[in-house]
Image: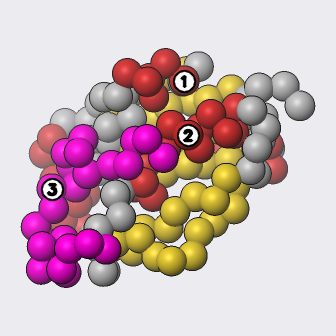
Amino acid sequence: MKSPIIIGIAGGTGSGKSTVTKEILKEITEKNVAIIEQDSYYKDQSNISFEERVKTNYDHPFAFDNELLIKHLKDLINCKAIEKPIYDFEIHNRKSETEKVEPKDIIILEGILILFEEEIRNLLDIKIFVDTDSDVRVIRRILR
C-alpha cells in the first residue's frame, strides 16, 4: 500500500467542517477513507476533578494531545492501524475504550486547530480552511 493522501479540514466551531467532509465522501468511495477528528485527541484529564475539567478551554491549542495525534498520523502514513481515543463530552475526558482505525488511501483530519501545529501542517497533503462568518457559527452552535 502506498502512503495515503492526508486532507486537513480546519475552521472555527460551526464553520461547516463536517459538511465539507460529507461532500468529499460523496465523491470518494467511503471504504477508501479514514476520518480522524481532532476532538478525539483532547488531552486525558483523569488527573483532575470533574469540576476542574469543566473549566478547560477546549478551543485552546494546549487542550489537545498533539503528540499522540502526530504519532497516529505517522503510523497511518506508514500503513499501521491505530487505536484512536474516544472523547466523552459529558465527563470531559477520554473513555477507556478506543476505536481501531485502519490505514486507508485517504485520511481526512478534521478540527478547529489542525493548522496551528506546524508538525501537523507538514503532514497534510491538502489543507482546507472553512471560513464562515462568526455570527453564522454562533447561531449554529446555539442550535446544536
Look at the image and tell me whether residue 63 can be seen.
yes
- Residue 56 in magenta stretch: yes
Residue on which the image places disc 3: 57
Instruction: Count all numbered tags in the image, as a single digit.
Output: 3
Mark positioned earlier in the residue sequence (3 or 1): 3
Q: Name the residue beneath numbered marker 2.
A: 71
For this rendering, which residue is in front, 31 or 118?
118
Q: Which mark is residue 123?
A: 1
Residue located at (62% from left, 34% from top) = 74
Looking at the picture, tell me which residue is in the foreground, 83 or 5: 83
Going by the numbered disc 3, the residue's amino acid type is Asn
Horizontally, is 50 left or right of 67 in the view? left
Range drawn in magenta: 46-68
Residue farthest right in this picture: 1
Q: Earlier in the sequence, mark 2 or mark 3?
A: 3
Q: Residue at x 46, y 76 (%)?
A: 95
As helix, strand or loop, the secondary structure at mark 2 comes to helix
User: What residue do we see at 70% from left, 32% from top?
Assistant: 77
Q: Quadrant of the C terminus?
A: bottom left
How far apart, in angstroms, are the residues tagged by discs 1 and 2? Answer: 11 Å
* Residue 84 rendering spot, x and y as whole percentages: 58, 58
Query: Which labelled disc corresponds to residue 19?
Result: none
Residue at horizontal 33 percent and vertical 49 percent from the top: 64
Q: How many angstroms separate mark 2 from mark 3 (CA)?
A: 24 Å
Mark 3, secondary structure of its residue: loop
- Which quarter of the rendered picture does the N terminus lie within? top right
**How many neighbours does mark 2 have within 10 angstroms: few (below 14), some (14-19), or many (20 or more)?**
few
* The stretch drawn in magenta includes residue 85: no
> Given the image, on which type of amino acid does mark 2 rest?
Lys
